[in-house]
Amino acid sequence: MTEVYAIVIFLFVLFLLLGTGVWVGLALMGVAWVGMELFTTRPVGDTMITTIWASSSSWTLTALPLFIWMGEILYRTRLSEDMFKGLAPWLARLPGGLVHTNIVGCTVFAAVSGSSAATLSTVGKMSIPELRARDYPEKMVIGTLAGAATLGLMIPPSLALIVYGVTVNESITKLFFAGVFPGLILALMFMAYVAIVSTTSSDWNPKVETGMSFVEKVANSRFLAPVFVLITVVIGSMYLGYATATEAAAIGVLGALVLALFQGSLTVSSFRDSLMGAMRTSAMIALILAGAAFLKLSMGFTGLPRALADGIGALELTRFQLLMALLVFYIILGMFLDGISSVVLTMAVVEPMVREAGIDLIWFGIFVVVVVEMAQITPPIGFNLFVLQGMTDHEMGYIAKAALPMFLIMVLMVFVLIWFPGIATWLPENLRQNPGG
């Protein structure tokens, strides 16, 4: 019965604080504080300070601000314009035409950003005017952009995977490589949907691109070379075991600075803006993680996570039934919280359940990220929907309807992961490790 009281109190305090507009990180600390006061006799202040310091001084966590800074630097370059010039000649003749530049462009930028919002803003500011000028269906332009931008949460370096890895104490490098194949497969599923709609819809009548010779296409591909070199160096250094995730992030920052310098985009102003942007985002995530660490400790003292795990075990749910329950749970939660907040808020309770069911935590990290990707395009709080609303001036309902097919494709991707778990586990299992891990 104590566990029931604890659940009611935790939920009441959490929703009270979130409903009054308190920052998520501070709301988590507030819930943890109440739990410590009511259910333990330990000095709350000392415990909170020790826990927050321990969670904030993690060496693994240093990869987070570095990857964020790399994305912020590239966000201020001409990367989106160059990507469109390089990709358009190769994609124009595919079924669906230049709409594929939304998906491929987001996939490429996701591999150097890690942020869904940065991916959406960078690719969208270039592709939306270009695709509108060529009379591509507006809903398809907006929908594919909303869906493909979520790949920033999946394809390494993913901020969501870093947060998940720190929360459950798993290898960031292995999580990164677990996200490679699922991210690429999800991008191909988006492209397949575009191809099917383009060949079956009567509304699909864009202006046809004039053909380019093979030599001209290759010449235009020079615009893609810098970013592909950066991706290869960052990801390759981790796969070959030459660098940890943190070291690869530092390499990425140096590479992004060099790229911005050669493009002429690196000024004192852009450098300062990128640094401040990275600082704001990093501080926000660090505060959430600190609050989550304190909440996890507080809930541990109540015995709530273990009691819930035992209760779920007593129901004798199959692995599939448990995953379906978690799928619905995270979709509902994603209607009100962003992806990273959803992960850190729930892992204290969900992690014991998952371990009890014998589910691989690396695989589960990819499962969770696919589901929280949906939160980015789920009203009323879907962050990608707000970004697109500002970029296109469409109503939220219009954008949500345009993104619905992408949401359904992500649901399908969840089942693909369940049916073929090796998609997520093969690469990290065959990852070369350096002596330092």
Image (cartoon, grey):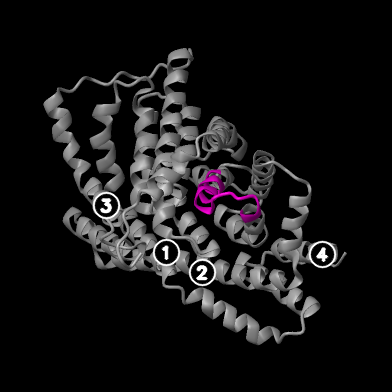
Say the numbered circle drawn on residue 236: 3
In the rendered structure, the answer to whether residue 197 lies left or right of residue 300 reads: left
Q: Position of residue 119 (x, y in %)?
A: 40, 47
Secondary structure under tag 4 reads helix
Residue marked by disc 4: 3
Instruction: Specify whether residue 362 is painted magenta.
Output: yes
Q: Report the Cα–Cα distance between label 2 and label 3.
A: 27 Å
Q: Nearer the viewer, mark 4 or mark 1?
A: 4
The N terminus lies in quadrant = bottom right
Quadrant where the C terminus is found in the figure: bottom left
Residue type at mark 3 is Gly
Q: Which residue is mark 1?
A: 64
Q: Nearer the viewer, residue 237 or 264?
A: 237
Sequence order check: which comes first, mark 4 or mark 2?
A: 4
Q: Tags 1 and 3 in contact by the CB under 8 Å rule?
A: no
What type is the residue that disc 4 sits on? Answer: Glu
Q: Secondary structure at mark 2?
A: helix
**Residue 29 picture location, percent across and down:** 66, 73
Label 2 Cα neighbours within 10 Å, binned few <14 / some 14-19 / many ≥20? many
Farthest residue to the left: give it.
215
- The magenta stretch is 355-370
Q: What's the distance in space between the residues labelled 4 and 1, CA to CA?
A: 35 Å
Horizontally, residue 72 falls left or right of residue 138, namely left
- Label 2 sits on residue: 286
In this rendering, does residue 277 appear at all?
Answer: no
Q: Residues within 10 Å of mark 1 (few under 14, many from 20)?
A: many
Mark 1: amino acid:
Leu
Q: Nearer the viewer, residue 356 or 125?
A: 356
Residue 23, image x, y percentages:
62, 67
Location of residue 5 with respect to 138 vertically, above or below: below
